[in-house]
Structures are given as structure tokens and as C-alpha cells.
Image (cartoon, rainbow, N blue to C red):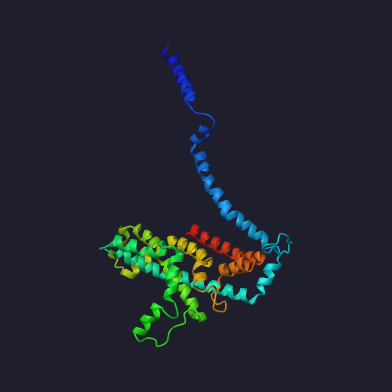
């Protein structure tokens, strides 16, 4: 009798559990995997609506002769891309974009690493300085760039004022009148805004380095440079690679800084892909050519992303 009672009670318990188990949508949500997919739906809709659809539409327009305020257009294949390859302004813009991006990212990495090491070594006022250092990155781009626009003003530039006060220069500097100075000015603003991002990312990596490794390196006779080379740098390298990838893509597509400061001038010397695409598609009403400009470097960006991700996986 005791042996036969056990399975009967077990079956009754299972029946009670199954009776209490919700059905329909409630049962679907009860599954954690299904709930995760359900919560992703708003994000997917937003990404497809705000990024996916415009991207596909721009790609389609780049193979046509579409112009604004004209409903009829025809398919022209690669004509827009071939014309861009023969356009001297576009070729100059490509060189400007790479110059702007590589220079800015290099100095953001260098200065960000220096600031991260400095903040990590602070013992007094560490929280205050970390919060204050984030201000350039937190302040909206348009507001901060407008402040820089006043600082580079040819008549009332505070930078020129201090340089003249120190006796380093005698004449006012035409920051946006000289191609080299104009490019240096927009790169300076981009570096100023991007250094806090790199500093905080690298600082987060520095915090995770075990102190035991530094102690062991010190016992082995390693100096500060050797400890950084063989202990610190290998630990922060993956974080640095990811941050550099994001910064490279964001800097290459930069628009606000250059457009507010120079509008691509003087003589197209600071035009980037984004600013030239805006001027061509929106101000020039040539949606087809503007779309082709915006997408011209897309295969190159995909290649850069693939190579860096492959390197990170290997490491």
C-alpha cells in the first residue's frame, strides 16, 4: 500500500501545478527567452525606423538621379559613384576626412591615456576631478562648439588675446581663413570633446588590473615603465581597441563641429563626408549624389570593423 500511494500523490501534485500554470500570453511571457525577445521589440522598431529605413532609402537613391521636389527619377546604376571618383572636391574631402579622423583619434587616445593614468593616481579629490573631467563630453555639442566659435573669432578670439599678451604673436590669427589653421581648429575641438570618453573608458580598465600583478612585477625589479608595458597595457588593450573603433566611426561621420565652425571652408579645406553630403543633398537638392557621398566609404568602414573585431576575438 505505501508503494502505490506515492505515485498517486505525485500525479495529483502535477495536476494541481498544471492547473495553476497560466496559459496564452502569460505562459509566453513566463519563459525568460520569450520575455527577452519581447522586450527587444521596441528597440528593434526604433532602430529599423530611424536607422534601417533611412539607410536603405539612401542606398536606393544613390543608384538613381533623384533630386528634391521632383517625383520622377530613373535608375542610373554606379554613375553617381563614378562621377564622385572623378570629382576633385570629393577627393579632397576624402583626404580631409582621413586627416581629421586619424589625427583626432590618435591624440584622443594619447591624451585620454595620460588623463586616465593621472586620475587613477589621484588620492585627493578623485571623485570631483573625475566628474569635472566629464563636462566636455556631457555638454551638448552645439553649445560647446558655439563657445569655441567665439574663442576662434578673428576679432575677439580669447586665444589670440592671450598669445598677444604673452608676446608670442603680433597680428591676429585668421583661424578660419587659413586652410591649415582651420583644420587644426576643428580637430582641436573634436579632441577636446573626445578625450573624456577615452579617459573614462581607460580608467575603468585600470581599476580592474589586479594589484597583485604590480606587486609581483615590483618584486621582480620592474620599473614604472616596465610595469605599464607588461602589466597595465595588456589589460587595457582590448578596452582601448573597442573605444578606438567607436571613436573612429563617430569621428569619421562627424558633422556638428565642422559645420558650426567652418561650413567646410575655407576653399573646401575642412569639408568632411557628412558636411559635403549635407550641402549636396539638402542645400543642393541633389539627393542621389548626396546619398552616394554619404555611402561612399561604407565598405571601408565595414572592413575596418571586421578587422578590429577579428583582432579582438583572436586576442
Q: Position of residue 60 (x, y in %)?
A: 67, 59
Pick the residue in front: 64 or 40. 64
**For residue 241, above or below residue 163:** above
Q: Residue at (66%, 72%) from the top-left corner?
A: 85
Q: Residue at (59%, 76%) from the top-left corner?
A: 92
Pick the residue in front: 143 or 290. 143
Quadrant assignment, res 80: bottom right
Quadrant assignment, res 285: bottom right
Quadrant assignment, res 230: bottom left
Q: Return the residue found at the far bottom.
A: 170
**For residue 16, above or below residue 75:** above
> Total marks drawn?
0
**Taking 310 as reference, is 136 left or right?**
left
Pick the residue in front: 165 or 195. 165
Q: Say whether residue 159 is visible.
A: yes
Q: Position of residue 208 (x, y in %)?
A: 35, 57
Q: Position of residue 301 (x, y in %)?
A: 57, 64
Q: Where is residue 127 in the image (x, y as percent from the top left)?
A: 30, 60
Amino acid at each position: 500500500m505505501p508503494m502505490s500511494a506515492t505515485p498517486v500523490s505525485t500525479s495529483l501534485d502535477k495536476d494541481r501545478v498544471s492547473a495553476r500554470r497560466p496559459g496564452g500570453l502569460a505562459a509566453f511571457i513566463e519563459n525568460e527567452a520569450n520575455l527577452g525577445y519581447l522586450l527587444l521589440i521596441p528597440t528593434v522598431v526604433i532602430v529599423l525606423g530611424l536607422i534601417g529605413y533611412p539607410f536603405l532609402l539612401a542606398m536606393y537613391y544613390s543608384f538613381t538621379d533623384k533630386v528634391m521636389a521632383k517625383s520622377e527619377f530613373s535608375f542610373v546604376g554606379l554613375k553617381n559613384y563614378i562621377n564622385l571618383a572623378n570629382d576633385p572636391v570629393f577627393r579632397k574631402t576624402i583626404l580631409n576626412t582621413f586627416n581629421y579622423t586619424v589625427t583626432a583619434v590618435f591624440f584622443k587616445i594619447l591624451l585620454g591615456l595620460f588623463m586616465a593614468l593621472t586620475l587613477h593616481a589621484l588620492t585627493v579629490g578623485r571623485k570631483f576631478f573625475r566628474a569635472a573631467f566629464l563636462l566636455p563630453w556631457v555638454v551638448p555639442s552645439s553649445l560647446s562648439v558655439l563657445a569655441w566659435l567665439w574663442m576662434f573669432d578673428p576679432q575677439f578670439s580669447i586665444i589670440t588675446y592671450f598669445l598677444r599678451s604673452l608676446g608670442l604673436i603680433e597680428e591676429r590669427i585668421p583661424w578660419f581663413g587659413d586652410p591649415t589653421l582651420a583644420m587644426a581648429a576643428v580637430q582641436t575641438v573634436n579632441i577636446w570633446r573626445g578625450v573624456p570618453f577615452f579617459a573614462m573608458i581607460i580608467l575603468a580598465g585600470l581599476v580592474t588590473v589586479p594589484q597583485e600583478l604590480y606587486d609581483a612585477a615590483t618584486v621582480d625589479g620592474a620599473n614604472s615603465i616596465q610595469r605599464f608595458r607588461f602589466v597595465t597595457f595588456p589589460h587595457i588593450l582590448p578596452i582601448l581597441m573597442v573605444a578606438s573603433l567607436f571613436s573612429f566611426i563617430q569621428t569619421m561621420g562627424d558633422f556638428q563641429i565642422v559645420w558650426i565652425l567652418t561650413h567646410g571652408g575655407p576653399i573646401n579645406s575642412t569639408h568632411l563626408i557628412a558636411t559635403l553630403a549635407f550641402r549636396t543633398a539638402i542645400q543642393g537638392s541633389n539627393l542621389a549624389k548626396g546619398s552616394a557621398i554619404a555611402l561612399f566609404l561604407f565598405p571601408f568602414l565595414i572592413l575596418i570593423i571586421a578587422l578590429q573585431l577579428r583582432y579582438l576575438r583572436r586576442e
